[in-house]
């Protein structure tokens, strides 16, 4: 997964299920839905049909669901930035009110992740014909965090913004430090999907600073920001910035990734 340098809206009165906070659709929701460019329209009928297809039986349902969006002339960027997050949120709402089984949520999430990967690869191929990336970043998913859909979405967004990205998922501390030391990264993004893991992330941040160098800005984002403020996440983990807006994160880091893969603002 290397590119360039190393780098609820309840529908009934059923009780709310707390474990939903650790599922991949919540991670995806907070990491992708805020694009920094304002809200984007979702066709509710098309979304409902898309979700029905995602939940349907048989491995061909993923291709069928994607075909529904493309038949409706939804561009690939809107598929990964709008419809996949919206479908993930809808699955989450249905799980919360007990109208969709855990098995269906798991299958649907898996298909959404595969779709996200496939469409992002095609978008990446279009990006690759442009000039080489001038900005590189490391995206880190903490060890023992098994829901990676949100991080994959973030990587796709960053690459389409012209950033060369290395994704580090669930690595041991030693392996993660080796990866961090393997190249001159301009920034590192750490996903924090669960609030109870803030102490673990704080230790991870210390190790990242040792490996990356203290001049490299670190950004935390993720589902934790649905429960605590950006200031609290920043203070409790020791990162430089905390936000779920990737455009804002790049600005805060003093980086500017152009659509042509070049350009960098002066570090602050």
Image (spheres, rainbow, N blue to C red):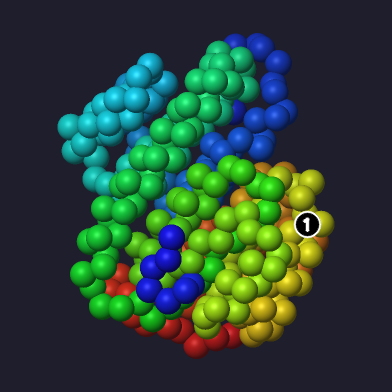
Is 29 displayed left or right of 113 in the figure?
right
Determine which residue is flagged by label 1: 200
Q: At numbered mark 1, what does the secondary structure look like: helix, strand or loop?
A: helix
Q: Is residue 127 left or right of residue 143?
A: left
x, y percent for residue 27: 58, 44
Most foreground residue, 239 or 1: 1
Q: Position of residue 241 (x, y in %)?
A: 65, 68
Q: Where, quadrant-wise, is the C terminus in this rendering?
A: bottom right
Report the residue at 58% width, 21% height from top: 102
Q: Relative to 188, is 134 above or below? A: below
Q: Is residue 16 left or right of residue 88?
A: right
- Using a 10 Å C-alpha cutoff, classify the residue at mark 1 as few (fewer than 14 neighbours), some (14 to 19) or many (20 or more): few
Q: Quadrant of the N terminus?
A: bottom left
Q: Quadrant of residue 46?
A: top left
Residue at 56 percent across and 39 percent down: it is: 24
Residue 116 visible at all: yes
Counting from the top left corner in percent of width and height, residue 249 is at: 54, 67
């Amino acid at each position: 997964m290397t590119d360039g340098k190393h780098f609820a809206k309840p529908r009934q009165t059923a009780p709310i299920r707390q474990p939903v906070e650790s599922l991949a659709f919540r991670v995806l929701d907070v990491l992708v839905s805020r694009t920094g460019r304002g809200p984007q329209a979702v066709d509710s009928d098309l979304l409902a049909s898309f979700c029905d297809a995602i939940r349907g039986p048989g491995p061909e349902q993923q291709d069928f669901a994607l075909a529904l969006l493309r038949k409706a002339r939804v561009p690939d960027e809107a598929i990964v930035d709008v419809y996949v997050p919206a479908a993930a949120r809808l699955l989450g709402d249905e799980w919360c009110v007990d109208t969709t089984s855990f098995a269906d949520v798991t299958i649907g999430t898996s298909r959404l992740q595969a779709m996200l990967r496939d469409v992002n690869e095609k978008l990446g191929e279009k990006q690759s014909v442009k000039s080489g990336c001038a900005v590189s970043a490391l995206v880190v998913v903490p060890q023992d965090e098994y829901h990676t859909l949100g991080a994959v979405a973030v990587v796709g967004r960053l690459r389409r913004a012209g950033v060369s990205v290395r994704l580090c998922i669930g690595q041991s501390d030693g392996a993660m430090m080796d990866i961090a030391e393997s190249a001159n990264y301009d920034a590192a993004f750490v996903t924090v999907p669960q609030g109870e893991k803030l102490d673990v992330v704080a230790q991870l941040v210390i190790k990242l600073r040792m490996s990356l160098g203290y001049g490299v800005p670190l950004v935390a984002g993720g589902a934790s920001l649905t429960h605590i403020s950006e200031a609290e996440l920043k203070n409790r983990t020791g990162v430089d910035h905390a936000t779920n807006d990737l455009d804002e994160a790049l600005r805060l880091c003093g980086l500017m990734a152009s659509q042509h893969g070049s350009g960098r603002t002066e570090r602050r």
